[in-house]
Amino acid sequence: MSKKIMVIDDEPFILMMIEDKFKRAGLEVITLRESKDALDIIRREKPDLIILDWMMPEVSGIELCKLIKEDPDISSIPVFMLTAKGQEDDEKLGLRCGVDRYITKPFSPRMLLEVVLERLGD
Amino acid sequence: MKDSEIERLKGDLQATIRELSSTYEELSLLYKLSEEFAGLSVEEICDVMLSEITSLINVELAVILFWDEESESFLLKKSKGILDDSFIKGKLNSLFYESMKKPRPTVICHIKEKIEPFDFPVRSLLLIPFKGKKRLIGLLLVANKRDADEFFSGEIKLLQSITSLAGVFIENALLSEQMQEFLLGAIKAFVKALESTSAWTAGHTERVTEYSLAIGRLMNLSMDDLEKLRICALLHDIGKIATPNEILNKIGKLEEHEWREIRRHPIIGSDILSEMTQYIDVIQCIRYHHERYDGTGLLGLKGEQIPLFARILAVADAFDAMTSDRPYRKRFPVEKAVSEIARNAGKQFDPEVVKAFLKWVKSAYNIELPQSEVHS
């Protein structure tokens, strides 16, 4: 069975880019442009890995990550966080909130796929 | 909207996304490399280049050739993969030369016949010229792609991005290496001027430099620190330029006031160099190279308060002083000098430096040391 990845970002082109790359690698991809209903969808879909953008209107990536990690049903799902360049200091905060890995924008789609596959292989 | 139109738009969107994706690849690569290249030497930049290139593209061979303006030939700088030693040595290959002069990469695929200067079968070849802001640097050559017969435009573009970024960094690194060489040359000229005024000091600086670096290497200093230590050692006695020649060259024992004069040379030396503000640690080292580890020296610094370079220099300097003839005494045998230094570990000298020194002197002079000295 193919693995299911959920990507939440408010930038449509980022979503499409990741979706295209991941689908070609045989992964199932669910994309969301808004974070506000994301928690319910995550609970329902139980993806194998979640990629979140840090900067999103309404619920930020870090807040959403905290909520995911507080819910025992979904807390074991690895969370990768997309951040802009120069937010390295915030990473410490994020790691405390349970972020598994940081990906700095602009990221390489090829590397993102590699680290995701590597993580799924664990 | 007609179905056919929707299909066409879908196709366009797909193409746009792939294009965006490759732009993202390129951007993230450039970000990463510009961070990695910063502060690296020319050799290291080339190493990073080749490892990045071979991770992007599966080829049997990747080579960096530098163009040498003076000899008008290519120099093999770095390579990864199968390569015969005789490859390119000293010859001006017209294919390479033409490729370097072109603004765009040269791509040759589906090669059937043998081509110069390769003495092994080449199936596909990509040559990318690269330059800095002001000068030609050379050529990147990749050959024999393993998983396809052709090079794709996306790959070529990425490789071009790497070479154009690397070109600028290599040019800067070359410049800074030239500056470093120039500085060392100027320092050596300075030292020559000093040594020419006193026959017995000739060669002293050179030997102290050699001994200091040997000790520094055994203490696992970084390349950067070793370069600084070299400058410290070369300049350590520069203050003697202000010591009257009749004292420096006096035959026979020195009077107390003459000794006082000589003892000032670390302070005078550091004052002379005080304008070299980028080399503050060199200046400090020179100022304190005659301090004693137990704190009983001229300026009273103690233990780790004395900069490490100065503590190394103190041992190297003492060893050379004892094993050289002076106007007022004959030189000591090496064994005697070594045991003097070992005996003064913890008093005049840093015990850690002495430990490294003993290790070096043992192998350099092939002498056996009493156990107590090795462990002191």
Image (spheres, grey):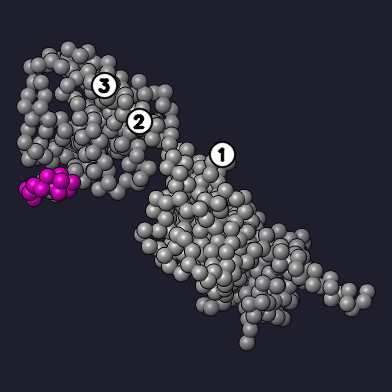
Q: Is residue B327 visible?
A: yes
In this rendering, would B201 be left or right of B84? left
Magenta segment, which residues?
Answer: B358-371
Instruction: Tell me the kind of residue under disc 2.
Output: Gly
- Residue at 44% in and 47% down: B73
- Residue furthest toward the right? B1
**Which is in the foreground here, disc 3 or disc 2?**
2
Q: Which residue occupies the foreground of this view, B90 or B60?
A: B90
Q: Earlier in the sequence, mark 3 or mark 2?
A: 2
Q: Is residue B287 visible?
A: no
Q: Which circle marks residue B194 in the picture? A: 3
Query: Mark 2: few, some, or many residues within 10 Å (few <14, many ≥20)?
Result: few
Q: Earlier in the sequence, mark 3 or mark 1?
A: 1
- Residue at 31% in and 24% down: B190
- Residue at 92% in and 76% down: B2
The N terminus of chain B - image quarter: bottom right
Disc 3 chain ID? B
Q: Which residue occupies the foreground of this view, B286 or B32?
A: B32
B203 is higher (above) or lower (below) than B95: above
Asked if disc 2 and disc 1 are in contact, CB closer than 8 Å, the reply is no
Q: Which circle marks residue B266 in the picture? A: none
A93 is higher (above) or lower (below) than B355: below
Tell me how far mark 3 sits from mark 1, CA to CA: 38 Å
Q: Quadrant of residue A60?
A: bottom right
Q: Secondary structure at mark 3?
A: helix
Instruction: Tell me the kind of residue under disc 3.
Output: Leu
Instruction: Tell me the kind of residue under disc 1.
Output: Lys
Disc 1 chain ID? B
Q: Position of residue B356 (x, y in %)?
A: 21, 46
Tell me how far mark 3 sits from mark 2, CA to CA: 14 Å
